[in-house]
Image: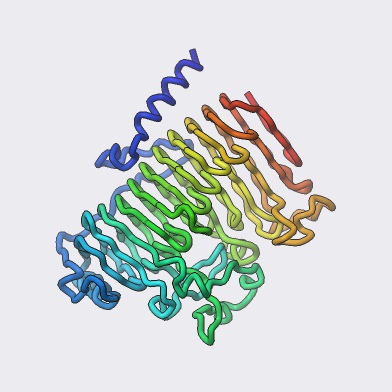
Amino acid sequence: MKTIKTLIALLLLIFTLQGNAQNMPGDIEPVKAPFEMPALVRPEFPARTISIAKTGAKQGKLSTKAIQAAIDRLAGKGGGTVIVPAGSWLTGRIELRSNIRLHLEKNAELHFSGDIKDYLPVVAARNEGIDVYSLGAMIYADGVENIAVTGEGKLVGPADDCELNLRQEGGISEEVGKLPMEKRIYDGSNGAKVFLPVFFGPMNSRNILVEGVTFERSIFWNIVPVYCENIIIRGVTVSSHGRKRTDGIDIDSSVNALIEYTTLDCGDDCFTLKSGRGIDGVDKNRPTANVVIRHCRVKRGVGGITMGTETAAGIRNVYMHDCVMENPSFPFYVKTRRPRGGGAENVLVERVRVEKSGKTVFKFDMLGSVEWIGELAERMPAREVGRLTPRFADMTFRDITILECPALINAKGLPEQPIEGLVFENIKAPTMQMQLQDVGTMIFR
């Protein structure tokens, strides 16, 4: 009887998820999670509106100043909706203010410049888990409340051969996190490399809505709230497959997030949870908590739902349910490194259908690669447990159906801190192949 009920539930799940945004209800249904989470509601905005064309934006010309003028004008009056009308518009970084909604009408395309100068001066940002002053985000906000990006239009990133890509710094070192903030300025001056701006990156903000829009051809991570609370992402499409390092959604040191009816097709991880990196993240102690992901679809990417590698302040209270994954490399991917600290706990994933897993379905990797962290990636000797020792525990995966995969589980914990409390219940897969290393308690039923 249980098997029949599970099959019926999965068939209904597939039917429901055919075209996520098209089937999205207008109202946000109450969140039912196995942890306490406040009710999330859409931010409300004053009725006043202004089109970017009214403040001087012109198609085919860089219109950053005109778009920012529309935002600032409405913000000065108490807020409202800035409209991007149908057409193709070009901009550099724009900054949202409190009580501002940026609305892209149908057939509107907001294209973003690939020139470094269009993202200056530097702003407070976080790059791969470490706080810096850098180019920030293409759509940026800091210390605001009640903001939104909505509509049926597209946000489009720059070309592959743009200056940003050609001068990008490939990664950030933990050593940067040990510097005083006045030494962490990355503005590209004197020909120096830069950290790429994320697409939409609010900082220190609350009551955030992203709804309906398409993020296309990004050059780095797409939707990245950092130090934020009360986040709703629904009916969004991310199309960045084929471009490296293009995560779909990264909830980073933020709390109370609902993601629903969203489709991600990424060049890197898809639904991703992070909370800082190394000593910088541990000292700030801003965890990611209370995240619900429901009625979503993963098309392609590295990790379907990923926790890490930046987990310094911890990740807890995560609930993913009723989702479909078409062809990610690792549908369920948990990863960190010895020097990065933190970890994850209290995670529940249920009623997920994996059509194809390019590699292992459940991947847990606490060691990483010698190429990136040297001898710390070696399993032995066991290290002393300290502030930077990650801990992963209490994760349950149930009612998961996998149609095609080369292996089911590959889990590598640490000899000094094994993975604990893994539960796999009612897993349907064509293979039960498992590799376990430094895994403590595990239940498979």
- In the drawing, does residue 387 fall left or right of residue 318? right
- Residue 311 x/y as whole percent: 59, 55
- Furthest residue in direction front, as rendered: 161
Q: Is residue 394 visible?
A: no
- In the drawing, does residue 55 fall left or right of residue 145? left
- Residue 405 x/y as whole percent: 59, 34
Above or below: residue 47 compared with residue 293: below
Q: Can residue 62 be seen in this view?
A: yes
Q: Nearer the viewer, residue 270 or 225?
A: 270
Rendering quarter of residue 177 = bottom right
Q: Identify the residue at horizontal 23%, vertical 56% (top origin).
A: 107
Q: Identify the residue at horizontal 32%, vertical 66% (top origin).
A: 111
- Furthest residue in direction top, as rendered: 1
Please name the colour scheme applied to the rendered image. Answer: rainbow
Rendering quarter of residue 102 = bottom left
Rendering quarter of residue 432 = top right
- Residue 59 x/y as whole percent: 23, 70
- In the drawing, does residue 428 fall left or right of residue 81? right
The number of numbered discs placed on residues in the rendered structure image is 0
Q: Identify the residue at horizontal 38%, vertical 77% (top origin).
A: 118
- Residue 250 x/y as whole percent: 48, 55
